[in-house]
Amino acid sequence: LVSRKKKAEDTVVMVKGEPIGDGGQSFIVGPCAVESYEQVAAVAAAAKKQGIKILRGGAFKPRTSPYDFQGLGLEGLKILKKVADEYDLAVISEIVNPADIEIALDYVDVIQIGARNMQNFELLKAAGAVRKPVLLKRGLAATLQEFMNAAEYIIAQGNDQIILCERGIRTYEKATRNTLDISAVPILKQETHLPVFVDVTHSTGRKDLLLPTAKAALAIGADGVMAEVHPDPAVALSDSAQQMNIDEFNNWISELRPMVKVK
Ligand code: PEP
Ligand code: MN
């Protein structure tokens, strides 16, 4: 069902009234993890000023080490929702447990399924069973066929509001945290009718690459770019090395603005 052969026209995903995949290009920005109301509000204010419509923030963090900050959980979703309402933004947050999908409906506009859960089939089915947009990230070592099959699990349950997100894959290269597979964008656009985003933060793990990779993503035809922004990355509880501060974010967006396609 995700195949272009089944449906030739692009699927437009509606996020709180905003179309994704209609030919325009947009951004999702926000901190790696929700840490406090003030932290999220600071990013929301900056995002709003730049005309961005979707705010991200992790409440349930799938960390590599069990001793790292695991996120604020439901409290994090509540903070996101409060900030989103105040700034009239849509919010996206990762859900890791199928049992939390129902609860999330009250707080988020887009359910994120993270790279580590791309083949958590019960989670995919649970996200497919609700009527809420889903942003599905490519698994750490998933082929594009496996990625599309994961999206198929969601659409098979009746939910076609799916955004695919390339976030880098694991290779032998150590210069970046993951290897951004930029060709995944046109391939996924050709093979499926779903919108495709590129997460430049997790694919590179490097601040100095956020601008060139975002340019590449926009130039190659991605429907949008995701990046992490934190008011004070040095004290961030996760991904402190690669989040932009507000000034860096403003510069980043200004550099990208001329090439963003608007519908
Ligand atoms: C995230 O976006 O917060 C995240 C954990 O990304 P990924 O699942 O791509 O690693
Ligand atoms: Mn992160």
Image (cartoon, rainbow, N blue to C red):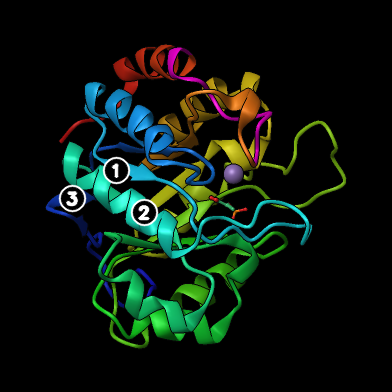
Q: Which residues are magenta?
A: 238-247
Please name the residue that numbered disc 1 is placed on.
Answer: 54
Asked if the stretch drawn in magenta spans residue 241, the answer is: yes
State whether residue 199 appears in this view: yes
Q: Is residue 238 above or below residue 42?
A: below
Q: Earlier in the sequence, mark 3 or mark 1?
A: 3
- Report crowding for label 1: few under 14, some 14 to 19, many 20 or more residues within 10 A (C-alpha): many
Neighbour class for label 2 at 10 Å: few (<14), some, many (≥20)? many
| 216 relative position to 154: left or right | right
Q: Mark 3 = which residue? A: 19
Residue assigned mark 2:
92
Crowding at label 3, few (<14), some or many (≥20) Cα neighbours within 10 Å?
some
**Distance Cα–Cα, label 2 vs label 1:** 7 Å
Residue 180: x and y in percent read 64, 41
51 vs 190, left or right, is left
- The image quadrant where one finds the C terminus is top left
Q: Earlier in the sequence, mark 3 or mark 2?
A: 3
Q: Are marks 2 and 1 in contact (CB under 8 Å)?
A: yes
